[in-house]
Amino acid sequence: MFTNVFGIPLTPLDALDFLISWYLVYQVLRFLRGTRGMYIFLGVSILLIVALVAQILELATLSWFAGTLKTVGLVALVIIFQPEIRRALITIGRNPLFRELVHEDVSPVLEELSRAVFFLSRRRIGALVVLERRIQLEELIERGVRLDARLTQDLLFAIFQPQSPLHDGAVIIRGDRVMAARVILPLLPTEDLPPSFGTRHQAARSLALETDAVCLVVSEESGAVRTFVGRSWKQLRSPEELKGHLQELFAEVEEREEEPEVGFGA
C-alpha cells in the first residue's frame, strides 16, 4: 500500500480517483483553451483554492464567505458557462461511441442551406460558407464574430448583404447552427485554380486542403456556386443538385469508422 506526502494510506481506488480527476481537469482546460471561458475558469479555480486554504487553516470568516459563494456560485457558473456547457455536451454526443444511438437527419438543414445559397447566387451576392464535418473548427470560430444562431435563409442573406458589417470573410456552420461570421480563413498557394477564381475561392480551397470541411463559394461576378472538398471542387447548377451533393458528402463521413481527427489548430 502506498502513502501520499501526508502519510495517508492510498488504495488502488484512490489512485484511480486521482488520475480520473486530473484527466477531467486536463480535458476542461483543453476544451476552454483559447476561449474567454478560460479566464473565468482560472478565476473560479483561485477562489476554490482560497476556500480550501481557509478551511484547512480554520479561518472562520473566509470559510463563511466561501460557503456563501458556493450557494450562488453554482447557479452563476451555469449561466456564465452556458455556451461552453452546450458545446461540451454536443461534442460528447457526437462521439462515435454514441453516434449510432441517434440518427440525425441533416436533410432539412441542407435543404434550407441550398435554397439560401442559390438565393444569394441569383442576386450576385458573394458568399463563403464553411460546413464543419469531423474536424472541429473552434479556433477559426473564435477568430470571427460568434453567433451560435439557427441556420435560416434570412440569416445568411442578412450576413452577406454588402452593407452588412459581417459580410467580409466566411460563415462557419456546425450542424444546424451558424456558429460564427466574418471569419478570415488562412490562404495557401493555389496555383492550380483557374485565374478567374477570386479570393473567396482561394480561401475555400486552402481550408479544404487543411481540413475535411465542405467549403461553399458564391461568385460575386457570375453567381456561380461551387463546393471545395479536399483537392476537388465542383460547380452546382440548382438547389436540388447542391442538396444532393452535400448529402453525399455528409453520408461519406457517417460511414467512416476511424476515430475523430484533431480539431483545426489544436
Image (cartoon, grey):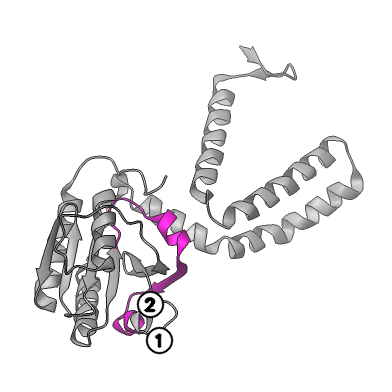
Q: Quadrant of the N terminus?
A: top right
Does the segment drawn in magenta span residue 130? no
The residue that disc 2 covers is 167
In depth, the one of 48 and 217 nearer the eye is 217
Image quadrant where residue 13 sits: top right
Q: Position of residue 102 (x, y in %)?
A: 27, 57
Residue type at mark 1: give it. Gln
**What's the distance in space between the residues labelled 1 and 2, CA to CA?**
8 Å
Q: Is residue 104 left or right of residue 231?
A: right
Q: Secondary structure at mark 1?
A: loop
Q: Secondary structure at mark 2?
A: loop
Image quadrant where residue 236 sits: bottom left
Q: Which mark is residue 122?
A: none
Image quadrant where residue 87 sits: bottom left
Crowdedness of circle 2 by 10 Å Cα count: few (<14), some, many (20+)? many
Q: Quadrant of the C terminus?
A: top left
Disc 1 + disc 2, Cβ < 8 Å: yes
Residue type at mark 2: give it. His
The residue that disc 1 covers is 163
Q: Is residue 201 left or right of residue 53?
A: left
